Amino acid sequence: MKLSTYNFLTSMAIKGVKVGFPLKLTINKKEVVETEFNPTFVERLLPKLDWSAIYGAAQVNPSDMRQKMSFQAELTEDIPAVQPENIGENEALLQKLHHLLFEIDVLEGQLECPETGRVFPITDGIPNMLLNEDEV
Amino acid sequence: MASLWRKYILWFAQEHVDFRISEFESIVKMFGLQFRRLTEQTLKPFWVVEFPNVETAMLYASRSVALRAMFELYAHSRKLPEFHERLRAHVDANRNELAKYFRQDTSFKITVETYNKHFSQREKIEKIETMDYLPIEGPVNLKSPQVEWWYIEFWGLDPTAVPEEPDDILFGRLLATGQRNLIKELSLKQRKFIGNTSMDAQLSLLMANQAMVREGDLVFDPFVGTGSLLVSAAKWGGYVLGADIDYMMVHARCRPSRITQKVREKDESIRANLLQYGCADRYMDVVVADFSNPLWHPRISFDSIITDPPYGIREATEKVETKRSPKDIARTDDMVHYPSTSHYSLQNLYGDLLEFAARHLKLGGRLVCWLPFHREDYDPKMLPQHQYLQLVANSEQPLTGNTSRRLLTYEKCSEYSALNPASIGSTQVPTPSEDFRERYFNNALESRKERRMRKAEQREQGRLEMELRGKLPSDGRSQKCELNKARFTGLT
């Protein structure tokens, strides 16, 4: 699961959940897949995203300590807490956003509903958002 | 500068004819192209269309899958003498401009294409000879000519009633071919990961054209399956996202569909398909999710939604069941649990789909989806409707004798507002008398068993008649048996 997709997912399908966003992300295993940088696409996607969740995703620590070091150095300081204006002119930030949103692939981990604590597992890079019969 | 409107011949493949006009309209709308269509009868494989300049024409050809090739029209007429007169006049009038194609150092080829009537090679050459007034000076090169002219005769569409004289005679210079090579490139035969209901390459390319997928678009398929629709969308530059309720399918662990394949290979996946066609960069994600219960953030908006929902025939229509009380059997937290699913009627599914599209499409974005139905009860009134979505195209593909499916294209025509009280219940999905699946299996004009019996009877009848004529029935199988018998009796 890429972190851009993470920004789209909510747990509002669960009965009784109002917002269900942002989900709490835990990363057990991730992979960096290099993809072509397309500044126009990043810019077009930004209005569809929630900045606080982008920022939140940049702060997520992989549970594995070894990965943690490199991951944090990479991202934590790169993404500002508040969405800056005129991002379109800031090529360096767009590049970092591209890396964060499209190149980091969460292979194993979980998403947790902020209201009920329901856990959605991520296996082989695919989140399983299916609910059980008694939850819908 | 005044634009130079010119006439072009568009030569279409005579396949999925009903989709041709909608594809054309989608492409010209997508690029905002100006045109004047001079051919009224869109079923004809040769159209004459005017474009303001050659770039416009090329832009159209760069996307069309229905198009075989495009030519710059020199002359056309229904009558042969008039045709030659016009061709001669055209070449005369445009002498200066055309001179470069007729030059001594420019190799050429003339192809004769006749539609609905066969001519021998000799006859075709004779046809070329009738145009000896063309001031061609260059050498012939059949393999890789620098200029290629086409002489086309159209002898109507009905092979049982070929007219005395051709309906149309056209001559033009080959400009570009359509994108039909992609059909072969994306063929399911060579694709890494396919399933029972993977959409064939041609139709999925047509769907992506209907959806007007362009470079950098965000495209979603809520019933992704093996991702066959994502492949074509990604090929045109869309970034693709998919969802499906079937965990095993999304993880490519379901039973293989190829007859020669016993188990799925480890590296089969939707992403692997995109990788195979060189568009792995366009892969966003696939998610295991139940469409009946939306989980997407309200902010997300898609440029297009392309989907082929399950019809309940080859893939089940299902959603997670709603139950009041959990099952009594003890379930520990770490135990794997597969939620039980219940039937998701096509009617509810389309209702949900249109509502989802109305919420999550950008303004002007398109929803492209298939609707199966029984041909005898087709009525335009049965098509699902939504207040915020406008039906812009509707093309039929026959499936079996009495069923077919329609490719519906909806365009979002106004901004969705949940506050508007009129929007509640704005999706109208008329109730068909019966469920598509129910009718397909149980209520056809002739049940499957009856059909089998009738066919067997026919075969038996045929065999008896053959025997009466004094011919010994021998099929391949009995021949083989005889041969084997002969071998063994020979040995002993």
Image: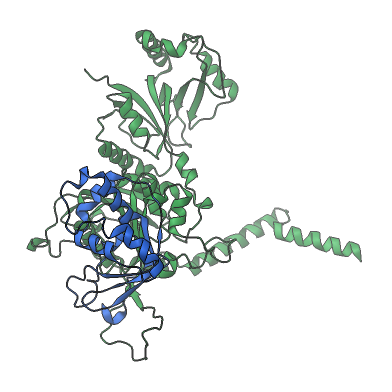
Between B225 and B259, the one nearer to me in the picture: B225
Q: In which quarter of the image is residue A51?
A: bottom left
Looking at the picture, how far across and down is residue B395, in whole percent?
Answer: 33, 48
Chain green in the figure, letter:
B
Residue B39, percent from left and from top: 32, 30
Which residue is painted at 27% across and 79% down in the image? Answer: A135
Query: Image quadrant of residue B360?
Result: bottom left
Which residue is at a point 88% across and 64% down the rendered structure image? B489
Seen in the picture, residue B476 relative to B80 is either above or below; the reply is: below
State which quadrant residue B442 falls in.
bottom left
In the displayed structure, does residue B392 sit left or right of residue B239? Answer: left
Left or right of B331, for residue B429: left
Colouring chosen for the image of the structure: by chain
Q: How many labels does the image show?
A: 0
Say whether residue B309 is visible.
no
| Towards the viewer: A6 or A131 | A6
Q: In this view, does A34 lie above or below A24?
A: above
Left-right relation of B479 to B461: right
Chain letter, colour blue: A
B8, B28: nearer the viewer = B28
A16 shown above or below B89: below
Quadrant containing the N terminus of chain B in the rendered view? top left
| Residue B51 image point, x, y percent | 29, 26
